[in-house]
Image (cartoon, coloured by chain):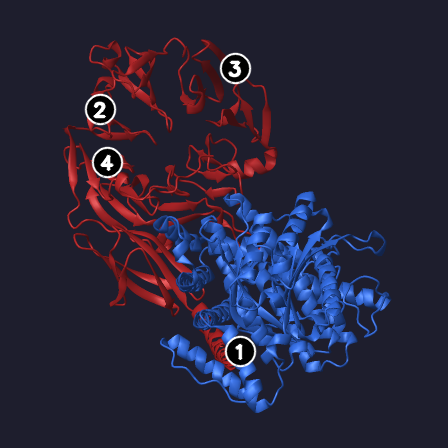
Amino acid sequence: MKPADGFDYTRHGLDGRGKRLQRLFEILPGAASLGLLGGLVALAWCRPLWALVFVIVFDSFFICYLSYILVLLALSSFRLGIERHTDWMARIRDLDGIRKSGAPPVESSAASPGRRLSEMIYHRRLRQLRASCDDFPRSETIHHVVIVPVTSESREVIDQSLRSLLAQSFPSDRTMVMLAIEENAGRRAHKAGWDLHREYYERFLALYVAPHRADADSGEEIHRAVNVSTAARMAAQALRERDIPLDCAIVTCLEPSAVPEPQYLACVAWHFMTCPRRQRTAFQPVPAYYGKVWDAPDLARVLHVGTSFSHLIDTSDPEKLVTFSSHSMSLRTLAEVGYWPADMVSSDASLFWKCYLRFAGDYRMMPMQIPLWLDIPHDGSLQSAVRGVYREHRRWAWGIENFPIILRGFIDQPAIPLFHKLRHASKLMFNSVIPATVPFVVFVLGWLPAVFAAVQSSSSIAVYNTARLQSIVLGFVGASLAIAAAISLFLLPFGRMKRPVRQLGGYLLSWLLFPVFAILFNALPALGAQVRLMFGQYNERR
Amino acid sequence: MIALRKILALVFTVAFLALCPALVLHVLKIMRTGIIKMDSQPKTASVTLDGRDIGGATPLIIPDLPPGTYEMTVSAPGYQSWSQAVTVNQGRATTLERVLLLPDKPRVRNLTDAGFDRLISIERMPFLLLTDGDSAGALRVFDTRNSTLRPLLPADSPMAAGRVEDIFIAARSSRVICHIELNDEPGILLVDVATVPHRIDDLSERFSEPAGKVLWDESAKEVLFSFRDGKVRKIDLRLGRDDSNFGGDWRGIGVFNRRVHYMERDGRIKSMAFDKSSEKTIFDDPRASREIFGESATYAIWPLDAETILFHSDNGRLCQSGLPNVLVEEGVRGVRSDEDSSRVLVWTARRLGVLETSSDKTRGTGPFEKGRQVTWIFENAGDIRDAWCVDGGSHAVVQDGGRLVLLELFAGVNARPRGIAGAKPASGVRYDARSGLVHALEPERGRLIGIEIAPPRSLLAPQPSRKSP
């Protein structure tokens, strides 16, 4: 059924033209990535010199991009660091003060330079708010709806998450928790859910268990997106019954292993309150896999630190647009767009694009400088940690499923300016092709002109010059990894280390394997997802 | 933060737009240059090009050289400087695999007190046969591993008084077969020089007819073949059975890969298992064969590599199974392949050439490839008697009359001979890769000497060993 606003964010139920467009756009990323890699191989064989020029262009781009990323990483880490001890609840009270008296809070003289900078940024924001005359809601009207999707997690894991929600500086009597339990999660999970409901119901505004039953008739599958959508619908109903307006309710879908900092919900609320277009904005924290970080194997630790870095970099770029794990948004907006897309694996990114298309481009992501600690999934063994990481990256890589739908949406949505459509389409293409190809080109295929030139004639200087160029690039990659590893040392929770020397040594040595990780856990899943989509093989289950 | 990010994005975009064309132009520029890749023995030698110090030590790559010819000098303390004009071509790497610097005063070791007039080396074995006259009792075996000298036959052996008519050896075999005439009676002795005392088997009774030429494959050493007047006799030492009519009317024979390779009188070339269980035709065109091999010459046959067979006639014609079939029309005195490289030395009395067998160096660029050919690198010699690849195939030591000369094989036609010592004319020479010594007989007294021209193998990095065919 086509929604009233026109564009249906799904690949199902398309007419002839829609189907053709969908297939065309499904083929595009895979064809571009394979074309780039295959083209380079062919070029290296037929024209090693041209291939060398291509590799130079690619490598110089990579060097510039890596430098850019490193600077951003340093800046984002610094920005995250200076907000680490911010009392967001106090800032909410400041907003209430401004509402009552119109006077800004007195600027305090913070001790450390970082804190002083944080205060400076904060007061500049307050001045902007006062100057823009934007109205912001009263803090007592703000409510949080936290949805925790449960599949196979133990009661202890969920209990830890709930306790961290209770420990929030934001009043728990304005926080509603929804345990979204999948039908096939098993009796134990359901029992744990109901036990927790009894234990915690009174301690929050409410705690509901939202079991989801797949509706086979509607083709609905047992799926995280459908599961949390059911919970969000229940939460909306519960808030309406309490006469709480949905536009003041912030919905956050937290991973069960997430342990938010005590200031987390207050931080979300502050950003929500001060955002002029709060109903058209998603709020994104920095998901950081630093929970139980020293219990995980060294390799898994490096992989997750790398992932956390990419999230950290993304949060410095609102232009990156897409939301990912554990973002927050207005419940009213969520209800307005019909909740999470039911047939998408990458539900968070899909929801963002669904909103973007639904509101004709009037939807954005606002980064929040607060980490959300997530556990590294593992059972102690390296094998399970690596498998877990690979699965997770494969699921993220499947975000490519949004590409054809978004491009169809751009065609169907005349209200979005053409410039924005082209900009976002090229960015999407870039963000699809580059991660799937860069590690291959830089670490493997970049050597091909040398190898093929050597096969064809050992006396060609292309052999020597390619090797010289590649050694410069790899030297730069090595230096960049060393800088990244050094930055990561400022972010890791060293207090929880069990065997400091061994763990720290293992962690730093594991960075040497980063090129292998980049191919195995980034490029391969990304390329695999693109090729599968290219050949019309879909992955609609989690 | 957003503004900062935009500024950063702009800065890095500008950096990319500036860096990329500059890099591409630079690489295109350096692709129009050439490079010299070189190594030396000893390493860490200093290099000058046209008198300017390059600033590095060998092994090194000298990049970005405009095409042209440069005078290169390689020098190291305690060694003679090496100078040569080196040509650099556009887009190409000129490779000087290993410039061998000779010591200022090459050390010459006297290895025996007695003098000899001939040196016979057993290829790929640490033994030398030294003779002084025709007497069997005068034959000595020199073990290069421990520099010991032993008589081939014990003094009390009745055959020691005989005259040596012929000596047969095979590569990688410690067995020496001697044809000795004693009181006009032929005697055939098989001596294993690796055993102490030498194990001696008298095969005289097995060779009821004169032996002719004796051949064997070391991988099946219990089977011997004698070749005489086109007839081949098989002698099975283990079973004690002989086949006096193993082959007849043949004009060439080679024994390798556990098969007998032979050329029939009409020019057909075939191979046969030792037990005659299988036969394979290699070349079945008698007319073409006559054009290649001639009508009557007798050929020695042996493998060049896994695909190619070499044919060396008694009148010095050198042919191969691949194209071009005729490598040298006549006058080839000797052919020696190198264990450590893909090079084969070919020499006549007046010149020495190199046959490259690695596919990379022999492959042509078009549909009509030239194939393997002998490149003559040393011409106008006096009387070449023997030659050996030296130092991993980078050089060759050649006995030219009464002198020993060293040639750089990688320099190709530009190789310049350097004299390293004198040697007894026509006595033979041998290079021992394990010790880095050139063995020769000194000019006057004929004593065995060892000339140090390269460090012992134990001091060098492992050399790539050549796959045996």
CA separation, marks 4 and 2?
Answer: 19 Å
CA separation, marks 1 and 2?
Answer: 116 Å
CA separation, marks 4 and 1?
Answer: 98 Å
Whether labels 4 and 1 belong to a single chain: the reply is no
Whether labels 1 and 2 belong to a single chain: the reply is no
Task: Of the two numbered discs 2 and 3 on the same chain, state the one appearing first in sequence.
Answer: 2
Q: B199 and B35: which one is in front? A: B35
Q: Quadrant of residue A259?
A: bottom right
Task: Of the two numbered discs 4 and 2 on the same chain, state the one appearing first in sequence.
Answer: 2
CA separation, marks 2 and 3?
Answer: 35 Å
Please give the chain letter of the residue carrying mark 3. Answer: B
Q: Residue at x 41, y 76 (%)?
A: A115
From this view, report whether residue A353 is shown above or below residue B196. below
Would you name the residue on which mark 4 appears?
B439
Alpha-carbon neighbours of circle 1 within 10 Å: few (<14), some, or many (≥20)? some
Q: What amino acid is at disc 4?
A: His
Chain identifier for the blue-coloured part of the image: A
Residue A326 place in picture, x, y as percent: 60, 63
Would you name the residue on which mark 3 appears?
B245
